């Protein structure tokens, strides 16, 4: 079930990020404390961890740069529609040939020429350039929405890592409780043996159970520490901090939603749907820009300058032109580009259908998992209650000498399983809440 939830976040593997904020700067430099207690304490809730993961995330920053790049492309296309002004200053020395070839041929010169000239070009009308500029502006919108998708994926993945750390923390608490329980049962077995009501086997069995519980506790503590490292890594913090998770896994009230209601929320808020619509628009504008190359365009050109063989004697000259460019035949290149652009439009339409199906799948899967997880938690809570009752009864039977501690050992095992079931149920429930919020594009409301 957890693997199903991880599919929601498969599009993006989160690389390292750096947590912004002045209060984090002091931890950027490596520390060399002697004990864990000497480390600076960082208290984080789920919301704070999700927000912190995108502040300086390299992947998010990369998409921000793509926004800048798309804006630069749009500015370049706009420049094609604005006046283009240039100028030059030149000096040349020339010899002129006069007359005809033969005995009368002469060469005059050399003569000096100075020239200063300014050129102005203005595209008066070009439907193709207008559509290219509109397509470039649509590209800016696409880049911005792509960055938002990346941000949400980063937040969702960090949230799941946070829940993994909470599950590991809960496992440590459960294994610690197992150790405390086994110590108590060992004490009881030892007292019973001293009173002649238990055997050495009972005491040995209790010791074995205690050592097994200690072993599982060590494994759980290692898992907890590794989970915290993964969370720190996902946020780009220095590892030299003592991370304290302030949230807990628990069952909370969740409003009931039908599939239709949930899908409507997703359609209104899911960024992937918005970005795909903009991709379709971008492909359509690109096709229009290529198609409109068939339309005649009008361009105005002019230049003004001074020319002469001496700078003080230079004369002013100018030239003004209005040109109409009529495309006739380019060897089929334009038709090839039109066909290619039409194919891109069809590809984006297919991708839109695929995104819609994917969103529908994620919403339905999250709803099913959430409803199932609520039932799992209820069953796990009842199972833990019954297993604790069974353990208490078996202890009483052992205490009065009507049973061996084999019954107690079996009851202990079932208590440990019940605790694990409850931890897994709570993790699945909260992870499915996260998945549903991601599927509906409402992570900020989680």
Image (spheres, rainbow, N blue to C red):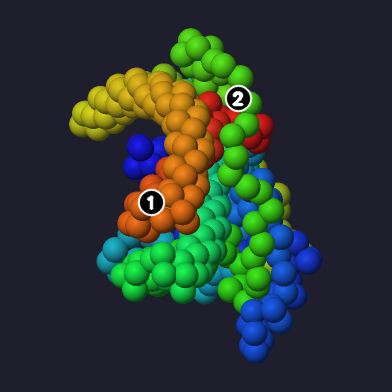
Residue 60 location (% of width, % of height):
55, 51
Left or right of 196? Residue 83 is right
Q: Which mark is residue 402?
A: 1
Left or right of 126? Residue 202 is left
Q: Which mark is residue 254?
A: 2
Residue 186 location (% of width, % of height):
46, 68
Looking at the rendered structure, the number of numbered marks drawn on it comes to: 2
Residue 394 location (% of width, % of height):
43, 48
Of label 2 and label 1, which has the lower sequence position? 2
Question: What SS does tag 2 mark?
Answer: loop
Q: Quadrant of the N terminus?
A: top left
**Quadrant of the rendered image containing residue 33:** bottom right
- Which is nearer the eye, 388 or 16? 388
Q: Residue at x 46, y 54 (%)?
A: 400
Label 1: how many Cα within 10 Å (few below 14, some 14–19, many 20+): few
Question: What SS does tag 1 mark?
Answer: loop
Q: Residue at x 27, y 66 (%)?
A: 102
Q: Quadrant of the C terminus?
A: top right
Label 2: how many Cα within 10 Å (few below 14, some 14–19, many 20+): few
Decide if residue 2 is in sight here: yes
Which residue occupies the extreme front position in the image? 196
Q: Residue at x 29, y 63 (%)?
A: 101
- Which is nearer the eye, 32 or 149? 32
Figure check: 262 above or below 228? above
Residue 296 location (% of width, % of height):
43, 21
- Give the alpha-carbon distance from disc 2 to disc 1, as whole Å: 48 Å
């Amino acid at each position: 079930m957890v693997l199903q939830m991880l599919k929601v976040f498969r599009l993006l593997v989160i690389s390292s990020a750096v947590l912004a904020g002045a209060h984090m700067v002091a931890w950027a430099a490596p520390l060399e404390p002697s004990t864990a207690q000497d480390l600076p304490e960082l208290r984080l809730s789920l919301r704070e961890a999700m927000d912190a993961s995108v502040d300086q995330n390299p992947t998010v920053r990369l998409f921000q740069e793509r926004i800048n790049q798309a804006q630069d492309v749009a500015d370049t296309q706009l420049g094609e529609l604005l006046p283009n002004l240039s100028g030059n200053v030149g000096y040349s020395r020339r010899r002129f040939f006069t007359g005809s070839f033969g005995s009368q041929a002469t060469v005059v010169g050399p003569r000096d020429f100075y020239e200063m000239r300014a050129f102005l070009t203005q595209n008066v009308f070009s439907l193709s350039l207008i559509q290219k500029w509109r397509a470039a502006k649509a590209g800016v919108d696409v880049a911005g929405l792509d960055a938002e998708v990346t941000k949400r994926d980063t937040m969702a993945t960090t949230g799941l890592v946070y829940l993994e750390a909470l599950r590991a923390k809960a496992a440590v608490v459960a294994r610690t409780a197992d150790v405390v329980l086994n110590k108590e049962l060992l004490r009881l077995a030892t007292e019973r043996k001293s009173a002649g009501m238990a055997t050495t086997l009972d005491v040995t069995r209790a010791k074995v159970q205690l050592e097994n519980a200690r072993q599982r506790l060590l494994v759980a503590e290692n898992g907890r520490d590794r989970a915290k490292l993964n969370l720190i890594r996902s946020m780009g913090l220095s590892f030299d901090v003592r991370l304290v998770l302030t949230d807990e896994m628990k069952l909370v009230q969740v409003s009931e939603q039908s599939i239709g209601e949930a899908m409507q929320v997703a359609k209104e808020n899911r960024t992937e749907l918005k970005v795909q619509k903009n991709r379709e628009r971008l492909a359509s504008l690109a096709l229009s820009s290529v198609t409109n190359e068939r339309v005649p365009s009008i361009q105005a050109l002019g230049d003004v300058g001074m020319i002469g063989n001496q700078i003080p004697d230079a004369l002013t000259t100018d030239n003004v032109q209005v040109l109409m460019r009529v495309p006739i035949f380019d060897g089929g290149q334009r038709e090839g580009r039109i066909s290619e652009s039409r194919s891109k439009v069809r590809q984006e339409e297919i991708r839109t259908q695929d995104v819609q199906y994917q969103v529908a799948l994620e919403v339905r899967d999250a709803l099913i998992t959430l409803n199932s997880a609520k039932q799992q938690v209820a069953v796990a809570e009842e199972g833990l209650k019954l297993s604790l009752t069974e353990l208490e009864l078996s202890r009483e039977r052992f205490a009065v000498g009507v049973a061996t501690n084999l019954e107690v050992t079996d009851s202990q095992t079932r208590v440990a399983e019940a605790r694990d079931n409850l931890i897994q149920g709570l993790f699945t429930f909260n992870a499915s809440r996260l998945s549903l919020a991601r599927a509906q594009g409402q992570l900020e409301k989680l």
